[in-house]
Image: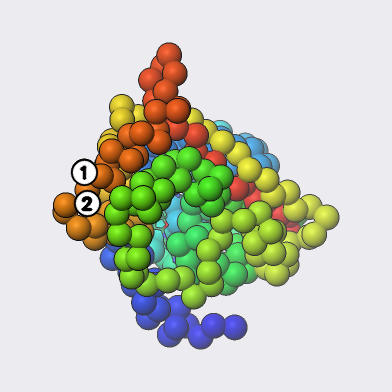
Amino acid sequence: MVRRSEVIDHPFRNFEHAGWEQAAAAYAETFGTVTSLFAPALLDAAGLRENMDLLEVACGSGFVAAAAAARGARATGVDFSANMVAEARKRYPALRFQNADAEELPFPDAAFDCVVINFGVHHFPFPQRALCEAHRVLRAGGRAAFTVWAAPEQNALHGIVTQAIREAGDAGVALPASPSGTVTETATCRQLLLEAGFDSSTLQVGTTEALVSVASARSLIDIFVTGAVRMAAVIKSQPREKLPGIFAAAEKAAERYRGKEGLRIPATAILAVGTK
Ligand SMILES: C[S@@+](CC[C@H](N)C(=O)[O-])C[C@H]1O[C@@H](n2cnc3c(N)ncnc32)[C@H](O)[C@@H]1O
């Protein structure tokens, strides 16, 4: 088990924390427009019904908690970024949002019927610890459901930008790495749920897709720069003279997703669910 001081002081956590504090003001209008596309599938997977107690971990600007409340649930959101919590409270004043770390939830055992984490798990230094916490705060029979991005090779949203940087930019930018490795495979998600104590016969882990409408690949890059953390840091650290080449490579790659309705880029996520 990881000691508390390591959870709070880890360089990866500090990098993520600083980044999300900075992204919070723009998040809902930028990257939040993409993550929110997955909220209905996530709430369905969590088995959410009216009058249930739902906890959204890593709630960002609170969209998923608000969608749960609109379905008649009592929704609570937590996030480790004070700026995100402030945004969520401003947008949804009737809901309860708290500043808390996913790896150390400030709730008693068996307090919720559902726990959902929309695109948060891969940002935690120790996702295993966060899923153990989700399991702890769930009532018996309650479900935890989470989404993470599929690997760039299976996910055009990230793949277009990653590949453009690989082709025309500087792919070797040094950023703090997660001590737990990446969470982009269904097997990893399944393992996280199993090790946290979720009933193996209840696990459902698969991919799900949404189409993201953008005016151009450049505007997709802007969404990452203003509303995300890791990809934003990679893009911001590119040598200035390489940016035109990166933008051109991304535009070229995005063209295959242009149809009658303009550019619609497939975003592929892993959706994982388990029952306590
Ligand atoms: C990609 S955003 C997702 C926000 C929201 N769930 C959504 O669907 O738009 C990731 C969120 O995770 C939060 N986060 C990252 N690490 C965290 C941690 N250790 N504990 C709690 N929140 C964390 C960030 O502050 C950020 O709001």
Residue furthest right as drawn: 201
Image point 16% across, 54% down: which residue?
Answer: 240
Identify the image quadrant of residue 112.
Answer: bottom right
Image point 54% across, 52% down: which residue?
Answer: 151
Give the SS element for disc 1: helix
Which amino acid, by three-letter code, is at mark 2? Lys
Q: Which residue is mark 1?
A: 244
Which amino acid, by three-letter code, is at mark 1? Pro
Residue 82 visible: no
Quadrant of ligand 1: it is: bottom left
Identify the image quadrant of residue 40.
Answer: top right
Residue 129 percent location from the top left of the image: 57, 72
Of the 4 image quadrants, the one containing the N terminus is: bottom right
Image point 33% across, 40% down: which residue?
Answer: 249
Question: What is the C-alpha distance between the residues marked 1 and 2?
Answer: 6 Å
- Cβ–Cβ under 8 Å for marks 1 and 2: yes
Residue 36 visible: yes
Residue 230 percent location from the top left of the image: 36, 59
**Above or below 207: residue 115:** below
Q: Which residue is mark 2?
A: 242
Image point 59% across, 70% down: which residue?
Answer: 128
